[in-house]
Image (cartoon, rainbow, N blue to C red):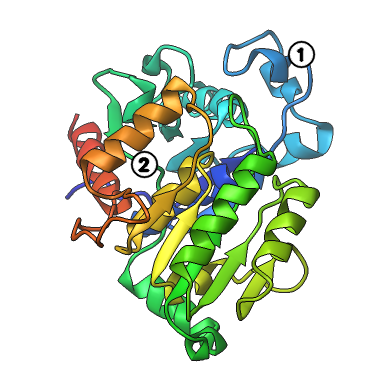
Amino acid sequence: MPFTPRSAWVISDGAAGNERQALALAAALDVPARVLVLPLRPPWSWCAPRQLPGGRLALSARDREAFTPPWPDLAIGCGRDAALLTRMLRSLSDGACFTVQILDPRLDTRHWDAVIAPRHDDLAGANVIRTLGALNPVDDAWLASAREAFPDFGALPRPRIALLVGGPGRGIEFDARLAQALAGTVAALAQGGSVLATASRRTPAPFAQSLRDALAKFPGVFWSGGGANPYPGILGWADRIVVTPDSVNMISEACATGLPVHTVTTAPLPDIRARFHDALRERGLLTDPGAPPGHAPPLRETGEVAAQLRAMFAARHAA
């Protein structure tokens, strides 16, 4: 009988995007997960996932109380801080805890049982599972549930154009040129229809306000905090999606819907982002706004990754 985890920890540094990937994987594995938000203290946070003496002192006294036995069958971490803790769990549990690390830990992957990393990270190893995009929960059932949770969006005129706005990052500026290009693209697509827009915690307030002003003539919603986040409903009811070029998570979730997905850039992307965008375009998942809708299958990799992990669990259990 293959090994099936009965308990899991999702270890988070508090970053919503990291936690979302880990929770999506736990759900795909059908294992109940306890979420532990465990930020690291300096100097451990500076060096993670490299180990320093006194490893558990990387956590505050309160957090150390949560990071104690009984150890789970499975630990899933996402991000560099979590990578130190999943690495430690492997030795603390004498190998009984199967450790999974999402995203490139920037260290030899042998310190974990499995590492899941996007292809644009160019990570290789016997225990590496490579994906095109970020893990997420988006599938047909998720989208149907989202539509049920936000039924009012269904009454908005079509086409309903979703606008997903992230924030600046290395080599990606959120300036007036990008705001103008985004607003122009959305307005051109939304003629006679409506706009469903959402900003993120990383979106500069003036940038969000300029988009809100430029798109105010369209019926719909522009969420930037306060009340329930309509993000699921936006994906569930959209006819097309426009997303800023910075967020692998948001672009991956947009591509998981099976809808036409577009992004807008006003400057060359950093190499790692450019490779991601190019791979999506090769698959027909990311298209130009003026192009006719394609028929590429939605990007849904979480279930495939879960199946590979189950095989790894079975091989470990047999050994």
Side of 297 relative to 58 (left or right): left
Q: Does residue 19 lie above or below 64 as drawn?
A: below
Identify the residue at image location x=54%, y=45%. Answer: 10
* Mark 2 Cα-neighbour bin, 10 Å: few <14, some 14–19, many ≥20: many
Circle 1/circle 2 CB separation < 8 Å: no
Identify the residue at image location x=29%, y=63%. Answer: 258
- Determine which residue is flagged by label 2: 133
In the displayed orientation, state which residue is furthest to the top. Answer: 53
Identify the residue at image location x=50%, y=39%. Answer: 265
Q: Quadrant of residue 96?
A: top left
| Rendered location of residue 89, percent (x, y) | 52, 28
Looking at the image, which is closer to me, 73 or 206? Answer: 206
Q: Nearer the viewer, mark 1 or mark 2?
A: 2
| Rendered location of residue 267, percent (x, y) | 52, 30
Identify the residue at image location x=62%, y=50%. Answer: 180
- Determine which residue is flagged by label 1: 43
Side of 37 relative to 191 (left or right): right
Tell me the amino acid under the disc marked 1: Pro
What kind of element bears circle 2?
loop
| Rendered location of residue 167, percent (x, y) | 65, 42
Looking at the image, which is closer to me, 231 or 29? Answer: 231
Q: Does residue 30 lie above or below 130 as drawn?
A: below
Mark toward the start of the polypeptide (1 vs 2): 1
Q: How many marks?
A: 2
Q: Quadrant of residue 196?
A: bottom right
Tell me the amino acid under the disc marked 2: Gly
